Image: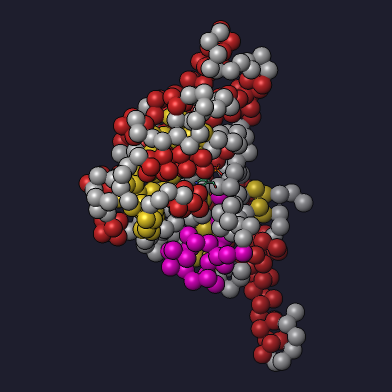
């Protein structure tokens, strides 16, 4: 069975060019970048080059990048570290944020409140304005949702957040490498991302933190003073160098990759819509070019996935799809539980081909038809008092 991988929002395969730059870091360039000798300083130079590459893709300055083990750690360091020093009492979190953001917010002593989203998944700016006051320390809103790909207008959110004197923390994990990210121009104070979402290695990411916030950020881990005291521990040089390379590649290829992926997600939608009844979750909002979340009316996502095992896709986010609960993202957008359970996320990568998309549409289309037929047959059997098949 040939698998078609359409789950790139969970993770992406590593670009072979990234692996090429990482390999020497496991061999002759193994030195600790904190060492003062020549080998250490050479490793440090490579780490700093990576920092520049990451900053370039994120539209920020090099010194605002703090390397972490991934977005989850960056979220905890950013949200908990910034809240702890703020002296304020409230924290606002967008209703469709990643579970790591809710967990980090709950780990503070803050009163955590949720900002509503519209039916199309974008943040309700009026609700944010209603909630904001001088007690709010931080607002956490994603640039691009991991389940629906819906994009938020971060500049507008930053503007109202700053009017209340609060900080804006933005999860750009899914946006980076897929749409232009301009953290400084948008007015973002803290941002989080992970290399493995953009064809880089797993286990590395970054917290981007503006200079004024750095001065009062409370570290979660203290020790050898690495990352200017914000995140202690010997740097994971192979992963950091790979992260930098992935960012440089993404920056050079972003425009063409996103144009192709937008075309392919459009094709996937059109092929499926021509065959079965589908609804786009996040319809009307701007979305990531690689992501489409579809509701198949009358067929549960679980059953469709069972009937089309060759197509590797997700119902909900990777981290919550192990649970049997309907997606909190879709519920927040106003879908009911049944509608949420009929929804599947398709997320494409830079190497996804038109042939794969056509084949996936074929397999998913027939799976949906089969599930609906089975539902009708068992519905009819139930109505006539028979045993459902
Ligand atoms: N934020 C978003 C939007 C994500 O999609 C993910 C991963 O799924 C994370 C944060 C956490 O990333 P990681 O598991 O690499 O720490």
Q: Quadrant of the C terminus?
A: bottom right
Image position of 199 (left or right of 48) = right
> Where is residue 270 shown, x and y percent of the image?
53, 59
Q: What span is in magenta?
A: 324-348
Is residue 28 placed above or below 199 in the rendered structure? above
Residue pictured at 60% horizontal, 49% vertical:
7
Quick check: is 335 in the magenta stretch? yes
Residue 245, horizontal then vertical, whole percent: 54, 26
Residue 379 shows up from this direction: yes
Numbered-mark total: 0
Question: Of residues 309 and 70, which is closer to you in this image?
Answer: 70
Residue drawn 53% across and 66% down? 340
Query: Which residue is more in the foreground, 200 or 373?
Result: 200
Does residue 359 appear anywhere in the picture? no
Residue at image point 60% right, 57% down: 321
Q: In which quadrant of the rendered view does residue 326 lie?
A: bottom right
Query: Where's residue 210, x and y in %?
Result: 35, 33
Please say if 75 is above or below 16: below
> Is residue 7 toward the left or the right of residue 54 in the image?
right
């Amino acid at each position: 069975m040939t698998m078609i991988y359409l789950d790139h929002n969970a993770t992406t395969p590593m670009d072979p060019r990234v692996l090429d730059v990482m390999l020497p870091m496991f061999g002759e360039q193994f030195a600790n970048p904190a060492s003062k000798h020549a080998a250490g300083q050479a490793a440090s130079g490579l780490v700093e080059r990576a920092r520049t590459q990451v900053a370039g893709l994120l539209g920020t300055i090099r010194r605002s990048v703090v390397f972490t083990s991934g977005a989850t750690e960056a979220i905890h360091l950013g949200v908990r570290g910034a809240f702890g020093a703020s002296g304020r009492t409230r924290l606002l979190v967008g209703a469709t944020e990643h579970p790591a953001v809710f967990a980090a917010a709950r780990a503070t002593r803050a009163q955590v409140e949720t900002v509503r989203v519209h039916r199309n998944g974008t943040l309700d700016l009026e609700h944010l304005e209603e909630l904001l006051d001088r007690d709010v320390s931080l607002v956490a809103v994603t640039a691009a949702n991991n389940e629906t790909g819906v994009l938020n207008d971060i500049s507008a959110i930053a503007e109202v957040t700053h009017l209340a004197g609060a900080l804006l923390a933005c999860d750009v994990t899914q946006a980076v490498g897929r749409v232009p990210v301009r953290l400084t121009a948008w007015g973002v104070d803290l941002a989080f991302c992970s290399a493995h979402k953009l064809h880089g290695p797993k286990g590395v990411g970054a917290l981007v933190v503006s200079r004024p916030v750095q001065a009062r950020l409370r570290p979660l881990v203290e020790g050898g003073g690495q990352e200017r005291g914000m995140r202690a521990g010997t740097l994971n040089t192979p992963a950091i160098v790979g992260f930098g390379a992935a960012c440089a590649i993404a920056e050079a290829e972003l425009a063409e990759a996103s144009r192709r992926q937008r075309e392919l997600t459009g094709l996937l939608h059109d092929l499926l819509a021509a065959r079965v009844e589908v609804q786009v979750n996040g319809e009307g909002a701007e979305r990531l070019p690689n992501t489409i979340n579809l509701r198949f009316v009358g067929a549960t996502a679980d059953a469709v996935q069972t009937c089309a095992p060759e197509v590797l896709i997700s119902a909900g986010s990777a981290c919550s799809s192990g649970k049997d609960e309907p997606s909190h993202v879709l519920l927040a957008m106003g879908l009911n539980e049944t509608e949420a359970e009929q929804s599947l996320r398709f997320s494409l990568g830079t190497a996804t081909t038109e042939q794969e998309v056509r084949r996936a549409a074929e397999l998913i289309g027939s799976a949906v038809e089969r599930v609906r037929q089975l539902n009708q047959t068992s519905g009819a059997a139930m109505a006539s008092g028979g045993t459902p098949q």
